[in-house]
Image (spheres, rainbow, N blue to C red):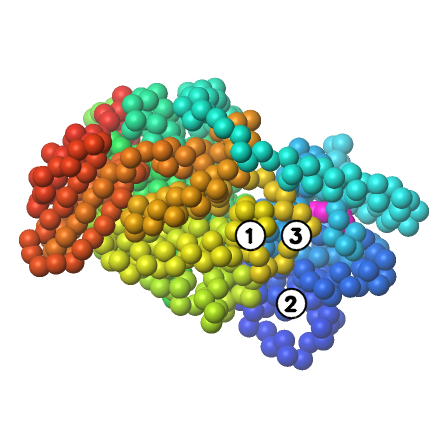
Amino acid sequence: MTHAKLDMAAYIARLRALDKSTLPPDGGQGFNRLIFARSPYLLQHAENPVAWYEWGEAAFGRARDENLPILLSIGYATCHWCHVMAHESFEDDQVAALLNSHFVCIKVDREERPDIDDFYMTVSQVLTGSGGWPLNIFMTPDKRPFMAVTYLPRHGRAGMSGLMELLPNIAALWRQRPDLIEHNCRGIMEAMGNLSSGKQVNKSFNLQHLTDTSFNQLRTMYDPLYGGFGTAPKFPMPINLAWLIGQGAAGNRPALEMALQSLQRIRSGGVWDQVGGGVHRYAVDREWLVPHFEKMLYDQAMLGLAALEANQATGEVFYLGMAQNIFDFVARELTSPEGGFYAALDADTEGVEGKYYVWDKGEIEESLGEDAHLFCRFYRVTDEGNFEGHTILNVTLSLDDFCAKEGLDPAETGERLERSRLLLLRQREKRIRPFRDEKILTAWNGLMIAALARGGVMAGNPAYLESAMRAALFLLERLRREDGRLLRSFLGEASDVPAFLEDYAFLAFGLLELFEATLDTDWLAQALLLADQMLQIFLDPESGRFLKTGLDAEPMLLAASMEHDGVTPSPFSLAAQTLIRLARNAARPDLLDHAGRLLKECHDDLQRQPTIHLGSLHAMALLESEPLEAHFSGPREHPAMQGMLHGLKSRYCPNLALSFEASDPPSALSICAMGTCYPEVHTAAELEAILERIAPRVKPDHTGRG
């Protein structure tokens, strides 16, 4: 039985619960070696006829002993095209026979081992100019690559090679032309070495010029009709949006409008789950209508942060509500009983992409009764549908505009639509759910902790703060070795993979946001501890450069990788931002030097392609700016203290340097900014007058929807 015909969650649960103590090392007759893996992605392939290995000496030793090439296949548990290639090829006996006869085959979960993925994805970028998952690398027993491909069908079609044709050719080449294989390997490794050594880390530049260049390039890529960047596929790109919001808060109104329109379009489109909340991974079309239905934790965190910053910059509640919608989804569907956050939800259900999320008009009418007509008009549900005969819910008019057009009362209509949404959510929960990858990744959890902490203080919602604190405690207690070394992931138990730079940087960021949201200095102390460990583990004493993989971890062949922001921030840029903020919050000026060193890693690339280094641009601007110093004193839990903290964190203040001293009442706040120290304030109302001078909100040209 293929995985496509199963409830994937039940399938993985069955494999995890299986008594494996009697199985031989190769998995036996019914399985391969992946049956012993903890990764859900690897377990998805445990019954393949392909004799998969996990990454490790067993695989490389066999390849050396038998002089066989290696197929390294990298993917992740909720990857749609990974599923397609698995069903077409890796579950096929003929493909497996070719692979097992001529190759040693290794499977890697890119979320568990981002170091392996990063290196070989860079190989793919160098060789082909692109990349993606599944990523398939053909390489020698000493791990040197000689070919890279992404998805391939079983047989060639439409000009695309197929595995059944490619594999015999590679096997013959390996036997008959080892000189050609060696030539390819040397050329690739030379190109990778040039990529690594070609970085000019001391080149000076003009920050304002790069800022202007970045904005102009983003404006060129911007879609003025539908928001976002480019045509299709279209990713939310919250890093771009957050940077534009920062530029807008500094006076660049067109930058702010680009970000706000994009957020509005995302929130109203099919890329947003209109029933359950949260954002899908990307849209396959320009209009944000048809999503690629995966839901990734990092997307929820990053888009939530961007929406919060839009609210801070403008004061418009639409954007705060957008973030809260994300947080409620994460609480309901991506939070573990222990408090950590799961990695992702799959796009597929029962082998059909999007099946869980789409609707038929008849089902809505049966579920909603007399409110169905209103719901269908608002969410554009038709008999014909807009996606393979079904409907992806989406909105084209704000609630106010819809009610004006239909002659309806907005308050009453909003209540009816919300009641209908909740009814459909309960109806949808009866369906077979998409598979949930229940890995708890330290880095992604750090981003979610940061978003929830900031959102909790801004929304005045203790549940968000409690969720952030539970997750932070879970990571600090369950994902650290006895020697204090942070670990990468958790699934039933902590992995033995040491955490990477992104894990340290992202979690320190989350803990710093928790301190600023609660004034609890224990979180600041933990963030500082991680920062100091980061300097010990990832700063190479010989080169003086920061590494993405710890000095104590398995090294890749070369320290070559693409250092830039993607769907998640570059670990270098977020580490730099966090070190700058920690230096100012905790009076640790030595951390500023290390932040500057981190930023030097991207100086050369930044000048060539500034729009993929916006996190570093933000950090550089932060480093050059004068901090807004805010010192709280008094009882931490006092309502006046909490009111002033809420007021301060509800404004866009990226250069905030916050400190707290516990003392007897009254609660007090002292602020120094832009060369002026203001009189001490004791209430949120007094603080508001100061914030109107030093962090004024920007009134956008386009109001928020809904």
Q: Is residue 408 visible in the rendered structure shown here?
A: no
Task: Depth check: give the residue in front, 110 or 351.
Answer: 110
Q: Position of residue 140 (x, y in %)?
A: 79, 52
SS of the residue under disc 2: helix
Q: Amino acid at mark 1?
A: Pro
Q: Which residue is mark 2?
A: 35
SS of the residue under disc 1: loop
Real-space Cα distance between discs 1 and 2? 40 Å
Q: Earlier in the sequence, mark 1 or mark 2?
A: 2
In the drawing, does residue 633 fall left or right of residue 300? left
Q: Which residue is mark 3?
A: 556
Would residue 223 be counted in the magenta stretch?
no
Q: Amino acid at mark 3?
A: Met
Q: Position of residue 19 (x, y in %)?
A: 60, 77
SS of the residue under disc 3: loop
Q: Is residue 17 above or below residue 641?
A: below
Q: Residues within 10 Å of mark 1 (few under 14, many from 20)?
A: few
Q: Is residue 581 visible in the rendered structure shown here?
A: yes
Question: Which residue is drawn at the image coordinates 79% and 43% (left, top)?
Answer: 185
Between disc 1 and disc 3, the foreground one is 1
Q: Is residue 138 above or below residue 7?
A: above
Q: Which residue is mark 1?
A: 541
Q: Residues within 10 Å of mark 2 (few under 14, many from 20)?
A: many
